[in-house]
Image (cartoon, rainbow, N blue to C red):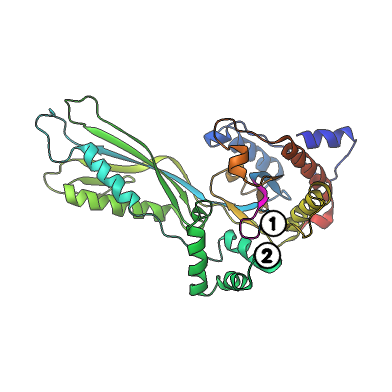
Amino acid sequence: MESLELLIKNDYKPARGVVAAFGFDEEASGFIGAKNIAKFLQEKFGKFSFHSLLDEGYGLTLDASTNQVVAAPAVGEKGYLDIVVDLTTPGGHSSISPDHTSIGMMGELAYIIEQDPYQPLLTNENPILHYLQCLAVNSEKLPKLTRKTILRAGFDKFANAKIVKVLSDNILTKFLIRTSQAIDIISGGEKANALPENVKMVINHRVAIESKVSDIQAHFTDRVLILAKKHDLQVISFGKEVFNVENKKGTIDIDFNSHSLEAAPISPSNDTVWKYVAATTRHIFEDLVFTNLTYPIITAPSIMPANTDTRYYWDLTKNIYRYSPFFAADMLKESKVHSVDEQLRFDSHLQLIAFFYEYVQNVDTPDADN
């Protein structure tokens, strides 16, 4: 907004329309804000009527493998799925307890889940492979053998396995190539002398680029069936009975906790629009911020492991970039994202203003179209 105010103050009149769409409930999934803004924009301008869309996301940081400044706009976004498991069993007095209460069985299911993490997968569909390839081609800081391994990882299973191992060993990169799962909520029981009749557990999933929500549903159901067959429990999976026994000892109901979201379509990182994002980045940060750099800043595609309001704008443009163009050597540590004292350095704030001030002007030409 400050960039646009400055352009207006300087009497800049763009030939290409600029829309500032500010939702107010992004942290609550944007059901009221962005969802309705996107609907209005599509009705007014039509499908795929926008040149590009920039939303919050990664910025510029020091790449750990090269120790060089790299810009990493996210061209994709992982999917989202919360699964709620509801286990109902007969109640009774705690003095006459079965071998396994509903809380005990739910704890066993939690153990089964955590002993079965989703396997890593790095394919040519994943922008993270393209990110690494950009570094391999453009940075001489990487050892020659490492560069060769990265460039072969798209078609050589042995090279791919080496890269997957390196990424999986780092907590900051391991979930860029696999579906994550986190048991975030568990509740049940009423008092100490009564058997718990109902226990609930909620498991959050961020779905890998190569996977589908239906894949997670099927895999999760298979895990629950292990528990159900052991303890004679009926299983209802997403509205359909999939297992039952005579003299059942309880019922497990698996369902969506709220909504689900498939992984976002991948935006181009090799077209004219992308080049304008990269060129604007280079000018701002090479000529104004880091004036003593001895190498060009690489702009390489990445993915968002979390979700943004862009989920509602997929039909407005294919060029969606989740990009906060400011530098942070360690984004999580410096900005304290979603934690106490969340903050943005003032220099970073100025970098954001400078980028958007220039980007709006740079793309205000037919030459910026694909």
Q: Residue at (51%, 69%) from the top-left corner?
A: 160
Q: Which mark is residue 22?
A: none
- Label 2 packing within 10 angstroms: few (<14), some (14-19), many (20+): few
Residue type at tag 1? Gln
Q: Which mark is residue 68?
A: 1
Badge 1 marks a residue whose secondary structure is loop
Task: Kindly tell me whether residue 210 is visible in this rendering.
Answer: no
Residue type at tag 2? Lys
Horizontal placement of 225 versus 150: left or right?
left
Horizontal placement of 233 versus 159: left or right?
left
- Label 1 packing within 10 angstroms: few (<14), some (14-19), many (20+): some
> Exactly how many numbered labels are in the figure?
2
Residue 129 vertical placement versus 319 (above, below): below
Q: Which mark is residue 141?
A: 2
* Residue 99 placement (x, y as % from top left): 13, 41
Q: Residue at (55%, 30%) from the top-left corner?
A: 340
The residue stretch that appears in magenta: 58-66
Q: Nearer the viewer, residue 67 or 101?
A: 67
* Residue 286 placement (x, y as % from top left): 80, 52
64 part of magenta stretch: yes
* Residue 226 placement (x, y as % from top left): 24, 53
